[in-house]
């Protein structure tokens, strides 16, 4: 029986790289994203490059409660909570950047965990993987609002880790440094920036080797 991973933010960056890494090993992938054209393009790639992987696409805006409720409950082996938004800026800027990013970076993950984790707990096995950030260790002034959401997500993870202890469900927080994703379209990437594929390899290795806790990339 194929193992099954659900990935949010699956059509770009780290999410897409993770989807491809799991698919390369024959896993079934449920890909969640909000842009239907990107999801259909992903289907075409899967038909050509990953014929052994079953791909299910889910169009959902996870920043809205309705979007979260459209994500199907299923027999997942791994839940990979990756979807996030990044806008550079400060907490006290005129625009409420934290409030905007909180909807996806924090609240969506909270809602998805409440929706999808009970099934894993019920069968007594599975793996919750959350994509965090080393930004919570190395504060950058232009990332104040974003990092605050990642602090909140890290707090949620610590709660999930505590509450799932002994349930059979493993918990891992993968915290990459700056990674070359679409978030850098209007900025100059720093030297030595991580590639999404490097983060995906850490995620896949954590699942295969059942590594838990916080992993810095």
Image (cartoon, rainbow, N blue to C red):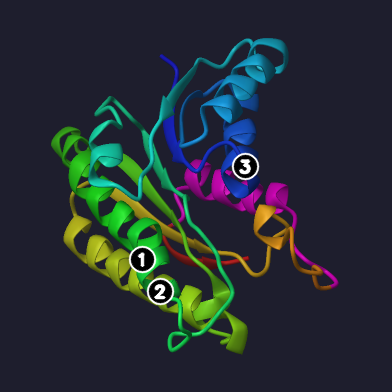
> Magenta region: which residues?
191-211
Image point (35%, 70%), residue name: 99
Q: Which residue is mark 1?
A: 102
Q: Is residue 150 above or below residue 204?
A: below
Q: Which mark is residue 151?
A: none
**Of residues 11 and 99, the one drawn nearer to the viewer in this rendering:** 99
Secondary structure of residue under mark 3: loop
Secondary structure of residue under mark 2: helix
Look at the image and tell me whether residue 125 can be seen: no
- Where is residue 90? Give x, y as percent: 51, 85
Query: In terms of image quadrants, where is residue 119?
Result: top left
Measure the C-alpha gap from mark 3 to mark 2: 22 Å
| In front: label 3 or label 1 | 1
Measure the C-alpha gap from mark 3 to mark 1: 20 Å
Q: Which residue is mark 2?
A: 98
Q: Which residue is mark 3?
A: 12
Query: In terms of image quadrants, where is residue 3?
Result: top left
Image point (57%, 34%), residue name: 19
The first of marks 3 and 1 along the sequence is 3
């Amino acid at each position: 029986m194929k193992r099954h991973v659900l990935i949010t933010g699956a059509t770009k960056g780290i999410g897409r790289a993770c989807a491809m890494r799991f698919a390369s090993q024959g896993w079934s992938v449920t890909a969640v994203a909000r842009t239907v054209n990107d999801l259909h393009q992903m289907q075409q790639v899967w038909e050509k490059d990953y014929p052994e992987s079953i791909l299910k696409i889910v169009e959902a805006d996870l920043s809205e409660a309705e979007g979260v409720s459209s994500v199907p409950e299923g027999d997942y082996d791994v839940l990979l909570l990756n979807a996030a938004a990044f806008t550079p800026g400060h907490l006290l800027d005129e625009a409420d950047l934290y409030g905007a990013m909180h909807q996806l970076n924090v609240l969506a993950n909270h809602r998805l965990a409440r929706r999808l984790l009970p099934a894993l707990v019920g069968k007594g096995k599975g793996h919750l993987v959350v994509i965090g950030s080393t930004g919570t260790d190395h504060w950058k002034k232009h990332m104040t609002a974003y990092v605050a959401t990642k602090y909140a997500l890290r707090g949620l993870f610590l709660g999930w880790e505590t509450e799932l202890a002994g349930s059979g469900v493993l918990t891992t927080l993968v915290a990459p440094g700056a990674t070359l994703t679409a978030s850098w379209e209007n900025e100059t990437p720093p030297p030595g920036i991580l590639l999404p594929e490097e983060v995906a390899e850490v995620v896949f290795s954590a699942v295969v080797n059942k590594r838990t806790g916080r992993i810095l990339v």
